[in-house]
Image (cartoon, rainbow, N blue to C red):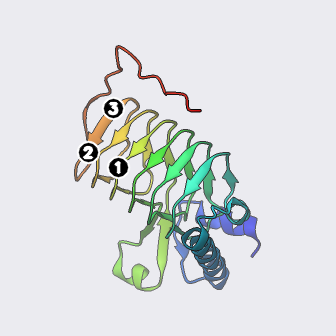
């Protein structure tokens, strides 16, 4: 099974064998790459994007992932530009996980595109299926947030700390809770804060 065949299988939304030896091999390679990356960040603060560019489907400019980052495959991760991801991020990219531009993600966040079979026999036989996750531009996700499969978070929205997101969140809102729900619209500042210049 080549990479394109594997991506077609896991991204189909249909049940597949999570213990398939080709899938297990790709997962183990991603784990090894993540460990190498995390060690470099921990040892020398070297955000070696060359490692992750070889692992991810796409990665834009000015992307910073802190240490103890983990993913399932990597080949289903699409990152825009100007992204900061804090410590202990987990992405189970059994389907496409897309993160837009100018996104902030707090520590201990999980994006889980995977799900196990509901039927106990199918589950015991390693049956899994997946749905994509999409994070829009200028989204801020607080610490300890968990995002489930099939979820889209609209641009500019804020997800409050500790939320469990199982349904889509529209653009331009603050949402929080377990389950996550919209609290209110984002209020734009009447006088925009101006970033200072530094010598």
Dot 2, how many residues are within 10 Å of its Cα: few (below 14), some (14-19), or many (20+)? many
- Image coordinates of residue 140 in percent, x first then y, are 41, 42
Mark 2 → mark 1, Cα distance in angstroms: 9 Å
Furthest residue in direction front, as rendered: 199
* Residue on which the image places disc 3: 173
Q: Residue at x 38, y 29 (%)?
A: 172
Furthest residue in direction right, as rendered: 2
Mark 1 residue element: loop
* Circle 3 or circle 1, nearest the eye: 1
- Image coordinates of residue 108 in percent, x first then y, are 38, 62
Which quadrant, please, contains the C terminus? top right
Dot 3, how many residues are within 10 Å of its Cα: few (below 14), some (14-19), or many (20+)? many
Dot 1, how many residues are within 10 Å of its Cα: few (below 14), some (14-19), or many (20+)? many
Q: Is residue 107 left or right of residue 60?
A: left
Residue 51 vs 157, above or below: the answer is below
Q: Residue at x 35, y 72 (%)?
A: 118
Q: Residue at x 54, y 78 (%)?
A: 18
Frontmost residue, 34 versus 170: 34
Residue 180 vs 69, above or below: the answer is above
Mark 3 residue element: strand
Mark 3 → mark 2, Cα distance in angstroms: 10 Å
Q: Earlier in the sequence, mark 2 or mark 1?
A: 1
Q: Residue 142 got which mark?
A: 1
Q: Earlier in the sequence, mark 3 or mark 1?
A: 1
Q: Residue 133 got which mark?
A: none
């Amino acid at each position: 099974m080549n990479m394109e065949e594997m991506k077609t299988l896991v991204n189909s939304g249909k049940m597949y064998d999570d213990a398939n030896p080709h899938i297990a091999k790709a997962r183990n390679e991603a784990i090894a790459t993540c460990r190498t990356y995390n060690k470099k960040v921990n040892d020398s603060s070297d955000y070696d994007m060359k490692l992750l560019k070889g692992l991810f489907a796409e990665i834009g400019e000015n992307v910073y992932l802190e240490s103890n980052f983990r993913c399932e495959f990597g080949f289903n991760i699409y990152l825009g530009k100007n992204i900061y991801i804090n410590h202990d991020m987990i992405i189970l990219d059994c389907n496409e996980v897309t993160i837009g531009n100018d996104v902030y993600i707090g520590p201990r966040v999980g994006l889980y595109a995977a799900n196990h079979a509901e039927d106990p026999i199918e589950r015991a036989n390693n049956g899994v299926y997946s749905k994509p996750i999409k994070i829009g531009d200028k989204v801020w996700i607080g610490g300890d947030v968990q995002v489930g499969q099939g979820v889209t978070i609209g641009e500019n929205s804020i997800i409050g700390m500790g939320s469990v997101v199982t349904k889509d969140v529209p653009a331009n809102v603050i949402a929080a809770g377990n389950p996550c729900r919209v609290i209110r619209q984002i209020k734009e500042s009447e006088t925009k804060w101006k970033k200072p210049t530094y010598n």
